[in-house]
Amino acid sequence: MNTDAHRIRVLKPLVHLASLAPLAWLFWLGAQGQFGPNPAEFINRYSGDWAIRFLLIALAVTPLRGLTGWAGAMRFRRMLGLYAFFYALLHVASYVALDQYFAWGAIWQDILKRNYITVGMLALVILTALAVTSPKAMVKKLGGRNWTRLHKLVYVAAIAAPVHFFMMRKGFQIEPLIYGGIAGALLAYRAAARLRVHFRVRAAASAASEEAGAKAA
Amino acid sequence: MIIRHRPLHPIRSSEITPKSVFDNRRAILRAMGFGGMAMAMAPLLGAGLGNPAQAAWRPETGKALSGTVNPKYTAKALGVEPTAYDLVTTYNNFYELGTGKGDPHENAGFLKPTPWSIKVEGAVEKPGTYDIDDLIKAEDIEDRVYRFRCVEAWSMVIPWLGVPLSKVISRLKPTSKAKYVYFETLFDPNQMPGQNRQVLEWPYKEGLRMDEAMNPLSLLAVGLHGEVLPNQNGAPLRLVVPWKYGFKSIKSIVLIRFTEKQPPTSWNEANGREYGFYSNVNPNVSHPRWSQAAEKVIGQNNLFGLPIKQPTLMFNGYEEEVADLYAGMNLRTFY
């Protein structure tokens, strides 16, 4: 227990550093003038890529605990989810500021008319709600049950993000499909775990009733 | 004591080429008449000497190339400066060489534009397989500056070197059955590594209605910015139809077929709702995923170093030349 607390204390700053590395790299590229002829496009793609990646990484925490049995992994879930939100915010901010130059009318039109932006915005709204309710105080305020129910929405975001990416690309491109596949696998793991629990409970129940029956006989 | 450290090979400031001169080196050479001289001598040397004029433009990457300036299509006539060479050649959509904007420049080396032949078939009197310099005569090469508008809502201004498509078509003598011209890009995953992935159904296909192809604006380009077409821009031979979205201007052409029926085109096959056969630049008809009313001008930046946005013009500013082609057509239906 003590060593686990120590391990987490050492790992936390390292995970923060690793999570901020893509941002640092973006600043470095910018300082070097490496954004290319269309900086808005570059920053937008870059931040979008990392938003999806962190979302998937955050979603991988629970399966990681299940597979390794290391409960300490859960202590990283919230921060990784918040980094996903951070990069998603950067992604949308770059669209609003660098791509649309704050033309709110055009942005609103985009959200309503362009399906891929509608889907992307859905993911952002979900991540925002989850980020706002992420402090411990909010868990208390909402009550554990409601909070858990609300945070199940992350599964919707996990599907919406790769779908948004796929819809945005022209032609049949492999990258969004890879992200979609990973998201699917992470959700399938949860579904399988739930089924396993379900069957185990049933098996236990029937075993118990058999036992009860045997006793009665 | 003052010790002056001198670099081993001092460069005097007078020796440094001013950036404006360096950036315009090709244009300056052209103005000095290097290209023009070759052009002027070509007819004199042509007879009996195996026509050096044609050899002069063989599609060797990086080689200087020039053409007769067409006064109708100069930067001055457009009132804009051409987009810098480095931007035109590093920011490309050419999925055969990769889907990232910088990929075509990076993977350009795979493509081998010499030797190059083009198959001509279909409703035409002179079918056959032509060497590129049989199809494109050096003396026909013109220097034309055109606006270029990508369907992704960005634009450039490109000084092309090319031959009017109508000239090439007339020489091939299409029959009365020819209502459309169909083009295909090279299919060879060794030269075009992007073709290892089915982003689109390869080879890339494009087509024009015959009257569009015969319009004086339609160009078969073999160069840009005073040199042979770089591979990433569709070497050695590409179409340029400046009133249509960029993807209509098919690159690295190996097949020209004259057909009676409207031919299939790649983006239309991939997503017919988003990309029509005509794909004329039209600010009033949105792409389903974004507005086409404005465009980012690559290379013209605002205070923050971001490309400025300008309104997109009907037919990309070539309304006068091409509007007649579509008289009576509903451009919302035939997008």
Image: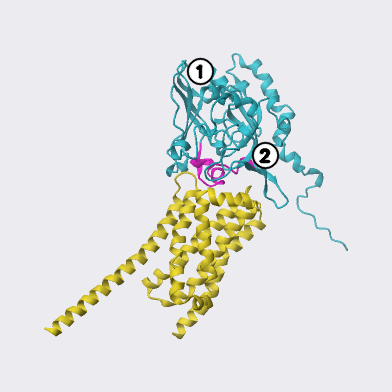
Q: Percent from the top left, x then y, of residue B219?
A: 59, 27
Way the structure is coloured = by chain
- Image location of residue B257, percent across then percent down: 46, 24
Say whether residue B286 is magenta. no
Q: Name the residue under label 2.
A: B83
User: What residue is shown with label 1?
Assistant: B172
**Side (left or right) of B222 relative to B174:** right
Q: Residue A38 carries which label?
A: none
Quarter of the figure with the N terminus of chain A: bottom left
Q: Residue furthest top?
A: B47
Chain that bears disc 1: B
Between B96 and A162, the one nearer to me in the picture: A162
Side of B81 relative to B208 (left or right) = right
Does dot 2 land on a helix, a strand or a loop?
loop
Mark 2 nearby-residue class (10 Å; few <14, some 14–19, many ≥20):
some
Where are the magenta residues, as a range?
Answer: B87-111
Q: Is residue B56 visible?
A: no
| Residue B116 visible within the image | yes
Q: How far apart are marks 2 and 1 (CA)?
A: 34 Å
Identify the mark nearer the N-term, 2 or 1.
2
Q: In this view, does B122 lie above or below A8?
A: above
In the rendered image, residue B63, in percent from the top left (x then y), is placed at 62, 33
Q: Colour of chain A?
A: yellow
Q: Is residue A112 left or right of residue A182?
A: right
Q: What residue type is labelled 1?
A: Leu
Look at 77% across and 54% down and name the residue there.
Answer: B7
CA neighbours of label 1 inside 10 A, class few (<14), some (14 to 19), many (20+): some
* Image side of residue A150 versus residue B83, left or right: left
* Depth check, front residue: B157 or A198: A198
Q: Of residues B109 and A13, which is closer to you in this image? A: A13
Which one is nearer the viewer's eye here, A64 or B88? A64
Q: Which chain is cyan?
A: B
